[in-house]
Image: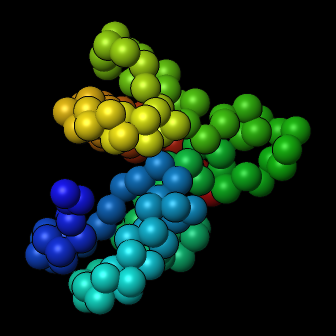
Amino acid sequence: MKPNCSRNSGTRQKKFDSVVTFNGRGFDVPFIYLRSALLNVPISKKNWLGYRYATDPHCDLAEQFTFYSVSGRDGAGAAVQPGFLLQSLRHRIAQEPRRDRMDVGALLAAGKFRDIAEYCLRDVRATVELYKIWKERLAGIK
């Protein structure tokens, strides 16, 4: 049996006016929009992709911590590989088995849904911590 989370997401989306992601403009939001279109599920928040250089309604921390990749391949922002900050924080948050997105397929095939859920929850906690760091130290830099 395949879980279908998309059918309930519309009712949950309506309660929020903004979203914080890590690489959400590059993956999560377009994925949700396209998946909704394929499943014929109405999109309640069509502005979550947002203007790239705005942090409201969508704050993409990957873009914030790399300064929108303005330094190019060799600059300071290049040292922040996607997921590096999340990996570091995830390790501080939970010393449990280190997992990343590459493990999800194998966990799904093995029926280890709780492991997937715990990985996702650690990612959410790490994203919250990253957001706090960004908000306190980097927000507003132009």
The residue that appears at 65% across and 45% down in the rendered structure is: 66
Q: How many labels does the image show?
A: 0
Q: Can residue 33 be seen in this view?
A: no
Is 72 left, or right, of 61 in this rendering? right
Is 49 left, or right, of 3 in this rendering? right
The figure's colour scheme reads rainbow
- Which one is nearer the viewer's eye here, 115 or 70? 115
Work out which residue is located at the far right of the displayed protein and give it.
74
Residue 135 image position (x, y, % from top left): 40, 44
Q: Quadrant of the N terminus?
A: bottom left
Residue 49 image position (x, y, % from top left): 46, 74
Q: Quadrant of the C terminus?
A: bottom right
Residue 129 lies in quadrant: top left
Residue 99 in the image: above or below residue 42: above
The residue that appears at 73% across and 32% down in the rendered structure is: 79
Residue 125 image position (x, y, % from top left): 28, 34
- Which one is nearer the viewer's eye here, 37 or 133? 37
Work out which residue is located at the far top of the displayed protein and give it.
95
Is 108 left, or right, of 2 in this rendering? right
- Which one is nearer the viewer's eye here, 35 or 27? 35
Q: Is residue 105 visible?
A: yes
Residue 10 image position (x, y, % from top left): 18, 77
The residue that appears at 48% across and 72% down in the rendered structure is: 30
The residue that appears at 25% across and 85% down in the rendered structure is: 41
Residue 39 in the image: above or below residue 20: below
- Which one is nearer the viewer's eye here, 21 or 6? 6
